[in-house]
Image (cartoon, grey):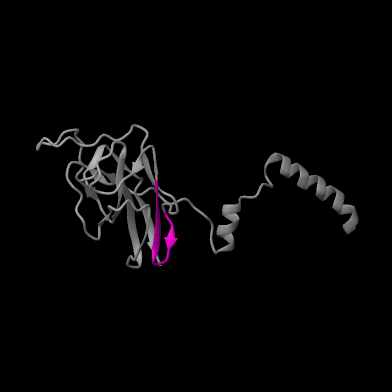
Amino acid sequence: MNRSSLAAPLALLAGALLLAGCARHDHAAMHAMHHGGMMTPAAPTAPTQMSASVPVLPSGYQKVASPPDAKVYFINLRNGSTVSNPVKVVFGLSGMGVAPAGVEKAGTGHHHLLVDVAAVDANAPLPANDQFRHFGLGQTETSVELKPGTHTLQLLVADQNHIPHHPVVMSERITITVK
């Protein structure tokens, strides 16, 4: 068979494969292969240990209720992401609003970025340090410098006094690698 006599059968075969779904292309997989490897989903990161949230603290402080549909999440990062410094982190929030620390307004809170945190007390003010980064001005994104290597990140929304809501509004805990 010559080249021109193969063209028609090959076109029919390609059309059949396309209709069968075998010839679809996966842009993400093609992008990953182009950049040196197969794209495989990262294993889930172990969740943060969280104490049981109570609506009223022993001191009598009534915790701020979170809306039932409230969710916080990372917009630009995924579990298994490899990034470079400075690491840009964009916070997503749905079902509630953002208000600066010190502002008491129903249905709102402000962001905290947890870096390499394994456990959180849901009934105490969050500490302010390199592991518990506060965004009390109402910021919805940041850029952070992290040492090269593997880190866990998690977002947590807290009330005007940096105490997690009841129930707690916390993102998935993800693992990233900083080059």
Residue 38: in magenta span: no
Looking at the image, residue 54 lies above or below residue 30: above
Count every numbered label the image shows and give the total: 0
Work out whether residue 120 or residue 68 is closer to the camera in this orientation and state it. 68
Which stretch did the figure color magenta? Answer: 80-92
Q: Is residue 89 magenta?
A: yes
Say left or right for 120 vs 150: left
Give the residue drawn at x 43%, y 61%.
82
Residue 177: horizontal and vertical position, in percent?
39, 61
Image position of 125 (left or right of 70): left
- The residue nearer to you, when weighing 138 against 165, is 138
Q: Is residue 29 left or right of residue 22?
A: left
Q: Is residue 19 above or below residue 154?
A: above
- State the residue at coordinates (21%, 44%): 163
Task: Where is residue 121? Give x, y as percent.
Answer: 19, 45
Q: Residue at x 22, y 48 (%)?
A: 119
The dominant secondary structure in magenta is: strand
- Answer yes or no: is residue 1 visible: no
Viewed as shown, does residue 6 lie left or right of 74? right
For this orientation, the residue located farthest to the left is 59
Q: Quadrant of the C terminus?
A: bottom left
Q: Look at the picture and state if 62 lies above or below 177.
A: above
The residue at 20%/36% (across/down) is: 63
* The N terminus lies in quadrant: bottom right
- Residue 94 makes an appearance in the image: yes
**Rendered image quadrant of residue 104:** top left
The quarter of the displayed image where residue 71 is located: top left
Residue 151: image location, x then y, percent: 33, 59
